[in-house]
Image (cartoon, rainbow, N blue to C red):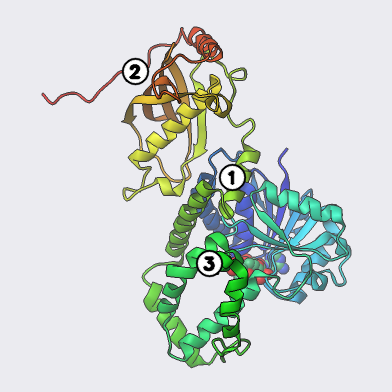
Amino acid sequence: MNKIAAIIGGGVIGGGWAARFLLNGWDVRVFDPDPEAERKIGEVLDNARRSLPGLSDVPLPPEGALSFHEEIGDAVDSAIWIQESVPERLDLKLKVYQSLQEACDPEAIIGSSTSGFKPSELQEGALRPEQIVVTHPFNPVYLLPLIELVPTDKNAPDLIERAKELLTSVGFFPLHVKKEIDAHIADRFLEAVWREALWLVKDGIATTEEIDEAIRMGFGIRWAQMGLFETYRVAGGEAGMRHFMAQFGPALKWPWTKLMDVPEFTDELVDMIADQSDAQSGMHSIRELERIRDNNLVGMMRALKAQNYGAGAVLNQHDAALKPGALPTLDQADLSQPILTLSRAVPLDWTDYNGHMNEAKYLEAFAAATDRFMEIIGCDMEYIATGGSYFTAENHIRYMQETHAGSRIECRTQMLLGQGKKLHVFHSMYEGETLLATGESFLLHVSLESRRPSPPSPEIEAAMARIAEAQAGLPYPEGAGAAIRRPA
Ligand SMILES: NC(=O)C1=CN([C@@H]2O[C@H](COP(=O)(O)OP(=O)(O)OC[C@H]3O[C@@H](n4cnc5c(N)ncnc54)[C@H](O)[C@@H]3O)[C@@H](O)[C@H]2O)C=CC1
Ligand SMILES: C[N+](C)(C)CC(=O)CC(=O)[O-]
């Protein structure tokens, strides 16, 4: 049975939480009095389906069931996680806890998305304060890993550990904020930057577009991978952080920033900022901007994944947790049929200007299927470390149907020859029952020392013989051995 999450308030943030849980295999029950809530969550889910599953290089669990409830008690019934994301008003949040705590399981965790309130303020007067913690997410909640997890000493250590475990299981990075403070950690930075930016516009120093360029062309990209302190340590040169502080510390006392002053939101300032923002981005609808944002985030996060750094390392850990059981081993597979060697969603950065999966990415998918087939026959990392491996000598791809971001694809592999140093495999790529493409590869076993063909280990020979015998009854695949014909 799937785990159940209740989403109380299904706006921008509640919709993101709903998508994160659903796409990680939880059932989600929503309570939101807004008659438009179902449509709005549907739109967030559409964005999430095209972007989140492809962040993983292994398949996410099957999507959970989504339901909408008219009574808060029905929504929280049987939920082990209740996420409150109603508007940022303390009186409203406290009223919501009153009614949901009358109905929910006392063991359930109640997380609040609040951007600014301290957990002690949310626990004030609650039926069971020990159930309530701050779990502050970042938009888009379905892609960004950070959750600021802020408990008080009313929360038992066991609840904090369970919260961390459940958040990690859906791909989040829970950052345990040990001491409560207004606006937690990250929003305090965002607010400081936001205040300074408003002054720069008001004082006519820069437009909204120039400020965004100053961020995204420089320190914004840098922050996305190393943050503030690691970046400045590097900026200190060989002497590191101490030198950086000695050199740039005094500047903090100069009047570079306006610190706590807030410009008054006069009609003039609001119009100036809104007009500049329209001129900068008004050619895109909000939904278009969301898609542009998601495309960029996925590309950047997948690049960080390749470096196993920052958010990329979190994604790799989530993949590692999902991996066991995702693909069969030699002993688990039905060897009489083509063997499942790839199962994943198409990442956003695999699609191109034609709006479908780019031709080069088919090779990437088939190469991953070949790598998996090598593992199945025993040519895994441990074996490769002993000095033997396979090199690909020839590939042939046939493209049959289009596929798109977020689509779940599978490769099934038939071994056409596995004898001595030769390995000849034929991969068929499917989306459901639809054959999308085929990829045929001829490989040679090599010695990594001499870089020349060499016989594989007896264990690999035996595994290939076992597959050859089991697949002997399969018809030779249509399209195997095909080539592009010479024009008549
Ligand atoms: N928008 C943002 O960038 C972020 C917001 N947050 C926090 O998330 C919370 C929600 O913010 P948003 O999603 O932006 O607001 P929103 O206005 O988009 O959504 C709030 C939703 O709550 C519903 N609602 C109102 N009263 C309710 C009630 N009594 N019971 C159930 N649902 C009710 C509304 O119909 C609406 O759909 C706030 O606490 C905010 O500080 C946290 C991170 C980022
Ligand atoms: C504007 N905000 C304070 C609601 C923003 C957040 O809380 C986090 C975010 O996603 O930027």
Q: Amino acid at mark 1?
A: Asn
**Which image quadrant for residue 246?**
bottom right
Where is 295 relative to 205, above or below?
Answer: above
* Image disc number at residue 390: none
Tell me which residue sits at (55%, 28%) in the image: 385
Q: Residues within 10 Å of mark 2 (few under 14, many from 20)?
A: few
Q: Residue at x 46, y 7 (%)?
A: 473
Please tell me which of labels 3 and 1 falls first in the chain. Answer: 3
Is residue 11 among the parts visible in the rendering?
no
- Residue bearing mark 3: 237
Considering only vertical position in the picture, is 246 above or below 148?
below
Amino acid under disc 3:
Gly
Q: Locate ligand 1 by image quadrant.
A: bottom right
Amino acid carrying mark 2 in the image? Glu
Q: Nearer the viewer, residue 392 or 272?
A: 392
Q: Secondary structure at mark 2?
A: loop
Q: Is mark 1 within 8 Å of ligand 2?
A: no
Task: From the image, tell me which residue sits under label 1.
Answer: 316
Q: Secondary structure at mark 3?
A: helix
